Amino acid sequence: MIQIKSERGATTCGLLAIILWSTAAGLIRSVSETFGPLGGAAMIYTVGAMMLVASLGRPRLRSISRLYLVLGSTLFVAYEVCLALSLGFAINNTQAIQLGVVNYLWPCLTVLLAIVMNGQRAHWIIVPGTAIALFGILWVVSGNGLSVPGIVANVQSNPLSYSLAVACAITFALYCNVTRRYAGGQNLVVLFFVLTAAVLWLKYALSAEVIPPLTFRGSLELVLAGAAMAGGYALWNHGILRGNLTLLATASYSAPVLSSAFAAAWLGAQLNGQFWQGAVLVTTGSLICWQATRQGKKSE
């Protein structure tokens, strides 16, 4: 189990978690191409669960409220399943990277839901921040100029993946707020990973997918994807407990750009200037929303 007590060390853990998470989308897509959307995702979370058990130990459930056990588990599993399958069912690698950016609408939605669910105070700049983030998503999905027919055509080309990506953003925003309100500082990510793997294996068993034989490259990508997901959550937990939260929160909003850059390089996808503009707009809008909560606290 990881034991890091200094603030600098814990902050470094948090920054490493952001880097690991930024590699996850590209790796999940790559594993899905090799082993299938369902089989690949189930294998990733199985490997991740084993890594988390080894690093964090078994979860202790006696002190956890039943309400959080049910809500937290449901939302976390729903998010991870939607994320893996939205990327796995993408038509091509470029669309998978677009879907990854849609998923990163969750920081903005987290702030909005915090106002409703947890009584979070916010400054008026949350309105333009939300608008900028939403515009960034539309700019990414449109592909070539801001065209409603273009957006509709892209979504209609793969409504399942786009619906799953939107569900990702909503469910993880809900998860963050439910965790803040009901978790009591407890971390159940090990249990959540085990449940996610179980759900994916069940879906695989009910499907017609067949996992192909393991290859060296496929096995390597599988281990890397599992490590990216499990390592990200394990390190982030230490970062937010003992590290510089302001620095980590600010750095985390660079994830859409970092994730897209890694996925483009790993998958060999060609992304135009408009895509990068949209990714930056999503990051900027989310940062403004986060700043709105800080301004809200100062005005109390």
Image: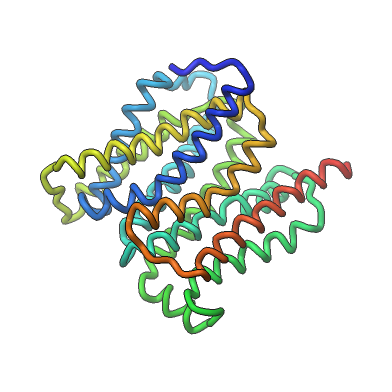
Q: Residue furthest right?
A: 299
How far across and down, in percent of the image, does residue 196 sit? Answer: 36, 40
Measuring 78% from the left and 58% from the top, which residue is drawn there? 125
How far across and down, in percent of the image, does residue 164 sit? Answer: 42, 59
Q: Residue furthest left?
A: 213
Please identify the quadrant where the C terminus is shown: top right
Q: In front: 296, or 25? A: 25
Q: In front: 299, or 136? A: 136
Measuring 88% from the left and 44% from the top, which residue is drawn there? 299
Q: Is residue 182 left or right of residue 203?
A: right
Q: In the image, is residue 41 above or below residue 244?
A: below
Measuring 52% from the left and 70% from the top, which residue is drawn there? 274
Q: In the image, is residue 132 above or below residue 232?
A: below
Measuring 33% from the left and 59% from the top, which residue is drawn there? 268
Please identify the quadrant where the N terminus is shown: top left
How far across and down, in percent of the image, does residue 67 sit? Answer: 54, 34
Q: Is residue 154 left or right of residue 9?
A: left
Specify the color scheme.
Answer: rainbow
Q: Is residue 235 left or right of residue 113?
A: left
Q: Is residue 141 left or right of residue 289?
A: left
Q: In the image, is residue 288 above or below residue 236?
A: below
Q: In front: 254, or 41? A: 254
